[in-house]
Image: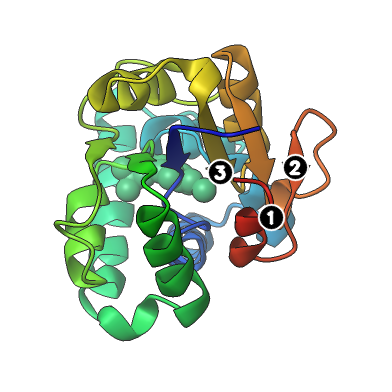
Amino acid sequence: MSYKGIIFDLDGVICSTDEYHYQAWKALADRLGIPFDRERNNLLRGVSRMQSLEIILEKSDKAYSEEEKAAFAEEKNTLYRQLLGQMSTKDLSDDVKDTLQALRAQGLKLAIGSSSKNTPFILERIGLGDFFDAVADGNCITRSKPDPEVFLKAAEFIGENPGDCLVVEDAHAGVEAARGGGFDCAAMGDAKEDPRATYHLEKFSDLLKYV
Ligand code: BG6
Ligand code: MG
């Protein structure tokens, strides 16, 4: 299949910020005495900050007000941004960097489709602030994955139809969003074995086999 555009998830695909999400949520959950581990963390992949918090609070026996929940989300995000602040161009792997350059050299349009409101900050930290042709992120959507909105926005921004674009995802919610929006999907990481995915990637550069 020859694609015209590729839409990448950010956290866990372009860079390993999924680990920082985990560390920041874990610190909050520990403080509140709520059980939380890496397996449960996988449920948060692709979903918005507030939905992530709701999933964590399902294991709490206390009920919290909306104000308390907003403060928890803020607390997590502050810690998360401290971790992001330590990132640099060294946090962009050679495998990802070289693959992105090779895809660009093939004339493909390259976009980001991420639920994260921290997307611009992260791209800046890893030296990709000006790299992508379009960025659709948590700042321009009303529904996060598994809703296809963010990918449809990204396709619109690069002027291509979903059927001509490939989405790259590490989250089951993201695979569902891509397929629901009419996109082919290359799955990696936690979602690698997802049967709904079109391709299954061992590593990011495996993408080059399919485009
Ligand atoms: C997604 C992550 O990319 O962004 C989720 O996979 C996260 O785990 C979501 O909850 C929102 O991120 P942020 O940076 O806006 O809190
Ligand atoms: Mg992800």
**Which of the marked residues, 2 or 3, is nearer the chain's N terminus?**
3
Does the beta carbon of the residue at mark 2 sit less than 8 Å from ligand 2? Answer: no
Does the beta carbon of the residue at mark 3 sit less than 8 Å from ligand 2? Answer: no
Q: CA distance from mark 2 to mark 3?
A: 9 Å
> Where ligand 1 lies, by quadrant?
top left
Quarter location, residue 4: top left
Between 146 and 135, the residue placed more toward the observer is 135
Q: In the image, which is nearer the foreground, mark 1 or mark 2?
A: 1
Q: Is residue 200 above or below residue 206?
A: above
SS at mark 1 in the image: helix
Left or right, 111 with reference to 12: left
Can you give x and y, in whole percent of width and height, for residue 183 in the image?
A: 57, 22
Q: Amino acid at mark 3?
A: Val
Q: Amino acid at mark 2?
A: Tyr
**Which of the marked residues, 1 or 2, is nearer the chain's N terminus?**
2
Q: CA distance from mark 1 to mark 2?
A: 10 Å
Q: Amino acid at mark 1?
A: Lys
User: Residue shown at 23%/37% (left/top)?
Assistant: 134
Residue picked out by circle 2: 199
Residue picked out by circle 3: 168
Can you give x and y, in whole percent of width and height, for residue 66 in the image?
A: 31, 24
Q: Is residue 36 above or below residue 74?
A: below
Quarter location, residue 152: top left
Name the disc covering residue 209, or none: 1
Can you give x and y, in whole percent of width and height, for residue 43 in the image?
A: 64, 41
Q: CA distance from mark 1 to mark 3?
A: 13 Å
